[in-house]
Image: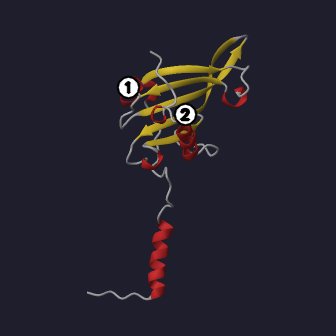
Amino acid sequence: MKVVMSAPAFSALILSVLVQSPAPNRNAAAVAYPDSYRSWSHVKSTVISPSHKNFTVNGGFQHVYANEEAMRGYRTRTFPEGSVIAFEWLEMTDTQGAYAEGSRRQLDVMVKDATRFAATDGWGFQRFMKDSKTELSTSLTPDQCFACHDKLKKDGLVLSSYRQ
């Protein structure tokens, strides 16, 4: 059976498909919030103290966690599919020189999935704001995360090292 469609009808059909289709995006496959990241292996911690020039923006404690696959990558420096790394940024409180963890600033997440994130060397990136599992950063995009990691070219885009 042959179907004949007028030019205006065909144009309307194409337009409706385009309107419903998402725009192409290198990071179109979203990185999910890793609910259990604090039960993963602790890779390392760092502190940015009040004397650091970027303390007001980045100051406080940073903790890096890795799932089982990512821990294999930290040991071999080759990160397998399924690796997930969570980088938690916490504010710092000061009580007469005794520093303690404060509120969470953000949670940065990297996921190794060569199929979903082929355009970014197999890694997906996402920054979750404060304690939210859904609020994403608007000031730092996944493409910007990739650009910085790619520029540094360290061990498959992973910048942290395991403290043994």
Q: Reading the chain from its start, which is encountered first: label 1 or label 2?
A: 1
Q: Dot 2 surroundings within 10 Å: few (below 14), some, or many (20 or more)?
A: many
Residue 116 is situated, as x and y percent measured from the top left of the image, at 40, 48
Above or below residue 164? Residue 157 is below
State whether residue 143 appears in this view: yes
* Count of numbered marks: 2
**Label for residue 107?**
2
Q: Nearer the viewer, residue 32 or 114?
A: 114
Q: Dot 1 surroundings within 10 Å: few (below 14), some, or many (20 or more)?
A: few
Quarter of the view holding residue 84: top left
Q: Secondary structure at mark 1?
A: helix
Residue 50 is situated, as x and y percent measured from the top left of the image, at 72, 20
Residue located beneath label 1 in the image: 76
Residue 12 is situated, as x and y percent measured from the top left of the image, at 48, 79
Q: Quadrant of the C terminus?
A: top left
State whether residue 35 appears in this view: no
Quarter of the view holding residue 51: top right
Q: Quadrant of the N terminus?
A: bottom left
Q: Amino acid at mark 2?
A: Leu
Quarter of the view holding residue 66: top left
Of all residues, the one furthest to the left in this rendering is 1
Q: Secondary structure at mark 2?
A: strand
